[in-house]
Amino acid sequence: MIAKRSVLIAGHATSVTLETAFWDELKTIADGRGQSLNQLVAEIDSTRTGNLSSAIRVFVLTEVQRRAAEGRSLLHPAEHEPGQAAGHRQDGDQESESDARGIVDDHDDPPSPT
């Protein structure tokens, strides 16, 4: 699913369209760094050379690959013990990916026709 969201960069609102999986992971990365989503997007924007949406996707992919190479969980990297799979509770009950992240997203706009 595609979601269009407004972010503030240097005090200016701009719309960014990304797949919800990228928005979700971007939020996880921002939380892990102690940043707001706007702060992280502004950081990405300051180093990009092309399209902002593409730069965000590349940034997210690079971060996920880095965590995977370090052997860290892809979901909530700071909350899981090494060897504990994301989305699995210690008591053995499995939770969905969105439950594991606590995602409540009511910012999704219907996809615009292209």
Image: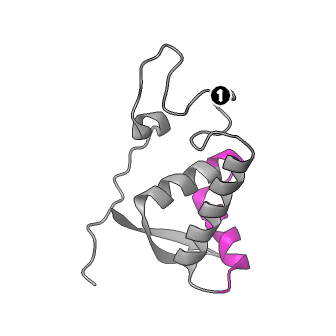
View extreme (top): residue: 91
Residue at mark 1: 83
Q: Is residue 12 visible?
A: no
Q: Quadrant of residue 9?
A: bottom right
What secondary structure is found at the residue carrying circle 1? Answer: loop
Which residue type does callout 1 highlight?
A: Gly
Queried whether the magenta region covers residue 47, the answer comes back as yes
Depicted 50 relative to depicted 5: above or below: below
Indicate the position of residue 24 as horizontal and vertical percent values.
49, 53
The residue drawn where x is 64% and y is 30% is 80
Residue range of the region highlighted in magenta in the rendering: 31-49
Q: Is 23 situated above or below 87?
A: below
* Prevailing secondary structure of the magenta residues: helix
Query: 68 left or right of 98?
Result: right
Q: Give the quarter of the figure containing the C terminus.
A: bottom left
Nearest to the observer: residue 11 or residue 107: 107
- Quadrant (top left, top right, bottom left, bottom right) of the N terminus: bottom left
Question: Which residue is found at the position 49% from the left and 13% from the top?
Answer: 91
**Residue at horizontal 49 percent and vertical 39 percent from the top:** 101
Residue 20 in percent (x, y) is at: 41, 59
